[in-house]
Image: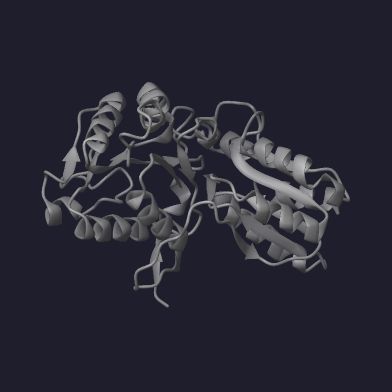
Amino acid sequence: MRKITYRDALREALREEMLRDSSVFLLGEDIGRYWGGAFKVTDGLAQEFGDERVRDTPISESAIIGTAVGAAITGMRPVAEIMFGDLTALAMDQIANQAAKIRYMFGGQTKCPLVIRTPFGAGVNIASHHSQSLEAWFMHVPGLYVAVPSTPYDAKGLLKTAIRGSNPVFFCEHKLLYPIEGEVPEEEYTIPFGKAEVKREGADVTVVATMYMVHKALSAAKQLEKEGLSVEIVDPRTLTPLDRRAIVASVRKTGRIVVVSEDCKTAGVSAEIAAVVAEEALDYLDAPVKRVAEPDTPIPFSPPLEQHVIPDEKAIIKAIKEVV
C-alpha cells in the first residue's frame, strides 16, 4: 500500500469531498492560493476549486466560525480552519453556544454540518499562545463531536466522515503529525466515529493514548518488549463519542492501564478516561490507574523547558513499570 503524509491525507480528504459534494467549501486565514494554510494542508486547493470555495478570511476567529455556522444551517457544508487551536478561545461563543446547540434549540428543524479543523500540541517552540492541547474543553460541550486522529489513515477516514455528517465536529490535528507518513489506500473509505483501534496487541498493561502520544506510546512499548513486557496500545480516535467499550475490554484483558495525553493533567482527557475505567472496570484492575500528561503550567517558549513539560517515552515507561 502507498504511504503518504498526514498532511497529504487531510488534503486528499478535503479534495475528494469537494469533488463529491459542491456544498463543501473551505474558509480560514491564509488557506488560499497565496499561502495554502499555515501547515500547507490546503495547498493547491484554491487553484483547483477557485476562491469561492477556498476562502481566505479576515484575521477574526469569531467571524470565521460565525460565518461557517450561518452557512451550515442554510445548507452548505463548511470546513473552517483555525490556524492554531489556542485561538478557538476567540470563537467559543460561536462554537459552544451556537454550533453545538442549534440543532437541539430548534428541535431538530435545522442542523449544523460544520467541521472545525485546528492544530494543537507543543514541540515547535512557539510558546504558550500557540502550543496548548485543549481538546478536553470541547469534550465538555454537548452537541460537539471531537476527533483526534493519530495517523494519516485515521486522519483521512475521520475527516471524510466528519464532512459528511449532520453535526458540528471539532477536528484536532497535532502539529508534529503533519509530516509523518503512513499507509493510506487509494480506494474510498471512511472511519466511523466512536470506534477505537488497538494499535498494538499486548497482555501485561493497557496504554490509552491520543494523537502524537500514540507514537510515543508505541515507541515506549517497543523498548519495553526487550524487557519482556507486553504493552497494548489503544487509540480512541474520537473523544466524543468515546469508545468506552474498547477501553474497558482492554483493561479486562490486561488488568492495568496507563492513560497518556498531551493536555494538562487536571480535568483533562486522561481524567475522563480514568473515570470511565473507575466506573466500569474497577474490579478488573490489579493496580491503580496511572496518568501521563502535561503538568498544569503554560507551555514554555524555551526549548529545554518545553521538552521538560511534554510527556515523553521515559515518562510513559516509568508509569508502565509502576503499575506492572
How many tags in the picture? 0
Residue 289 horizontal/vertical position (percent): 79, 43
> Which residue sits at x=50%, y=32%?
142
Residue found at the very far right of the displayed protein = 286
Residue 144 horizontal/vertical position (percent): 45, 36
Quadrant occupied by the N terminus: bottom left
Vertical arrangement, residue 234 with respect to residue 276, above or below: below
Quadrant occupied by the C terminus: bottom right
Residue found at the very far bottom of the displayed protein = 1
> Which residue sits at x=36%, y=35%?
108
**Closer to the camera, 86 or 317?**
86
In screen coordinates, is 2 left or right of 146?
left
Q: In which quarter of the image is residue 111?
A: top left
Vertical arrangement, residue 319 with respect to residue 110, above or below: below
Residue 148 horizontal/vertical position (percent): 50, 48
> Which residue sits at x=13%, y=57%?
48
* Colour theme: one colour
Residue 11 horizontal/vertical position (percent): 30, 56
**Closer to the camera, 42 or 146?**
146
Residue 105 can be seen in this image: yes
> Which residue sits at x=48%, y=35%?
131
Vertical arrangement, residue 38 with respect to residue 2, above or below: above
**Closer to the camera, 41 or 233?**
233
Q: In which quarter of the image is residue 86?
A: top left
Residue 206 can be seen in this image: no
Q: Quadrant of residue 67?
A: top left
